[in-house]
Image (cartoon, helix red, strand yellow):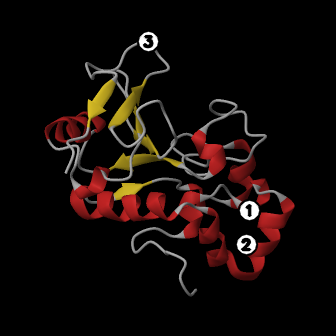
Amino acid sequence: MGSVYVPRYFRIEELLPPPVLLPELYATVYRSNKNVLFRLFDYRILITLDRLRERYGACSINNWHAYEEHEWQKGAPHMFRFSGWRPLDCSEGAMLSEHKQFRAMDCKFKTVTPDELWDEMLTDVNAPQFEFMQRIEAFGGMSWFHFDIGQHARYGKSVCVLSNRGDRAGLPRQIERIAM
């Protein structure tokens, strides 16, 4: 695919919703050569996914491809369709969600919890797996690790900690980066 970054550990199906939920243009490309759709994602998201997988082990984003096609439309318990990119008309998440701009991921790790990742981020925010992250979400009881590369007031100087449930799971509003 030339100079397009293709992740080592993730297939395009894991980053997109089922083909029946894609806009027609994307669905057409998906049917002819689905890997071309990696071009839609900012390379920093894809590199970060690979680095997270290398550091923390098995991780899933979307798992709809393990289900029957008739289940894709309705959804099923423990089926994830919108943990990577979300169509603009998707009712899940915020209207201006970074997911809808190809700049956010919700990672479900097999052997580590979001709390463990947050602890490591607090200890070493400059570690390679956190390099491109600009914002994370955190709240008590969270079972996935959300990160994005969206902008905020201290872009590049800190990781902004967002919470849509009123708490930040004990994290500060900003995790300061150490100037190198």
Q: Is residue 66 above or below residue 77?
A: below
Residue 75 as seen in the image, left or right of residue 66: right
Q: Mark 3 falls on what kind of element?
A: loop
Q: Residues within 10 Å of mark 1 (few under 14, many from 20)?
A: some
Amino acid type for the residue under numbered disc 3: Gly
Label 2 residue SS: helix
Q: Nearer the viewer, residue 89 or 130?
A: 130
Q: Residue furthest left?
A: 123
Q: CA distance from mark 3 to mark 1?
A: 35 Å
Of the two numbered discs 3 and 2 in the rendering, the one whose residue sits closer to the viewer: 3
Q: Earlier in the sequence, mark 3 or mark 1?
A: 1
Please state which of the two labelled residues, at mark 2 or mark 1, is closer to the viewer. Answer: 2
Task: Inspect the image, locate mark 1, and give the three-letter code of the amino acid beneath it.
Answer: Pro
Please state, as top left, top right, bottom left or bottom right, where the N terminus lies in the image: bottom right
Circles 2 and 1, Cβ within 8 Å, touching? The answer is: yes
Instruction: Specify the label residue 30 is tagged with.
Output: 2
Instruction: Give the Cα distance between marks 2 and 1.
Output: 7 Å
Q: Amino acid at mark 2?
A: Tyr
Which residue shows up at 72% across the image and 33% down it?
A: 91
Q: Is residue 40 above or below residue 100?
A: below
Q: Is residue 4 above or below residue 177?
A: below
Q: Position of residue 54 (x, y in %)?
A: 26, 64
Q: Are marks 3 and 2 in contact (CB under 8 Å)?
A: no
Label 3 sits on residue = 166
Residue at left offset 51%, top offset 43%: 78
Image side of residue 135 versus residue 170, left or right? right
Residue identified by numbered label 1: 19
Q: Position of residue 179 (x, y in %)?
A: 21, 45
Residue 89, image quadrant: top right
Measured Cα–Cα span from mark 3 to mark 2:
39 Å
Label 1 secondary element = helix
